[in-house]
Amino acid sequence: MTRQMPSLTIDLGFPRFGGANIRTWIGFKHLFSLAEEAVLIWFREKALGPQRLYHDFGLGLDIVQASGQCLAAVEIDDRVAAEVAPQEAGYFVVRLVAERAGKVTNLFRGRIRIELVREVPGGPLTAFADGPARGMETIIVDRIRPNGAAPMSEVKEPDIGVGGNAFRWDWRARYFHCHYSRRVQHSSYVLALEEVVERFLAGRGISVGRMLEEKGLIPVVSRARIDLCADAFMEETIETEFRLTDILRDRAWEAEMSCYVRRAGGRFETARAGILHAYAHVRGPAIGRVAELDQETLAALGRK
């Protein structure tokens, strides 16, 4: 895959109704989902959709890295278009836009990396490099290894617990977290990031519901990144660590997530993520604007 491959403009339609959880705004995980869908459409336009890759070539299309910046609030009735620009080494730059009052508004800018994992060893790849697949053989791997990372290696036991700026949560990788019948997919870690944030805030006494009811505030994501480090498999327990790392000018906070599995007595990292959160007003004259956090909220977040 090279920079000379043309970009593609796609009409994605409207965001899914399930993503409008607060007022009629669309949450960050659904923007990642729209960006993912845009990249899948790029492959389908090459006659290389996930179904054909899997059945004809024994390859599983995997998102192994995704990062994005939210540029504007997205509404449920925004008709979203995407520009997908392929880069080198399996990367795609995705821009989401919507037309409002006759003008194009930038909604989201992201970067996604794809790897094609051999689901069937020795699959029929003879014809794969011909035609539309030319150049894609460079992203075929035996197991996910984002950015050529070293093979899965054991990591130290955590020094983390509930309290301070850290939080621990374990979840079971059920079948609906997986794809290709066995492996946890990238979108499940996006969901895990959203859930561990919600659990962290509730544990600090500033749950989403309380902040919404009492202060008229809702957490909003400015940017996020979720990278896979190694495969996790169906019915494994994903040990998830979350840590708030910084509070920025009393208006936003940064945090990190790491996910692990245990095998044969060892503990191995499968994913890591970073997120930048702020709070936005949901009512009154400041609706939609970023709020300055009061002392109660700052103390709950760990401000001394």
Image (spheres, grey):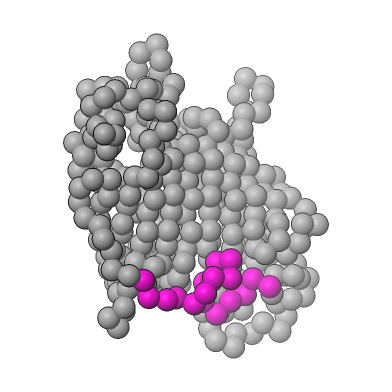
Asked whether 79 or 288 is in front, the reply is 288
Q: Which residue lies furthest to the top in this view?
A: 285
Picture layout, residue 95 above or below residue 171: above
Residue 278: percent from the left, percent from the top?
40, 32
**Residue 144 is a magenta residue:** yes
Residue in front for this viewpoint, 145 or 7 = 145
Residue at 37% across / 75% down in the picture?
154
Question: Residue shown at 50%/32% (left/top)?
Answer: 74
Quadrant assignment for the C terminus: top left
Q: Is the magenta stretch mostly helix, strand or loop?
A: loop
Frontmost residue, 299 versus 66: 299
Q: At 26% across and 60% down in the image, what residue appears?
A: 159
| Residue 59 seen in render | no
Q: How many labels, in total?
A: 0
Which residues, given as a range, are shown in magenta? 138-155
- Specify whether residue 159 is in view: yes
Query: Residue 29 appears in which quarter of the rendering?
Result: top left
Residue displayed at 46% across by 60% down? 186
Q: Position of residue 282 (x, y in %)?
A: 36, 22
Image quadrant holding the N terminus, namely: bottom right
Residue 107 or residue 293, whichever sits in front: 293
Residue 275 against residue 189 in the figure, above or below: above
x%, y% of residue 285?
Answer: 40, 11
**221 displayed left or right of 22:** right
* Residue, far front: 304
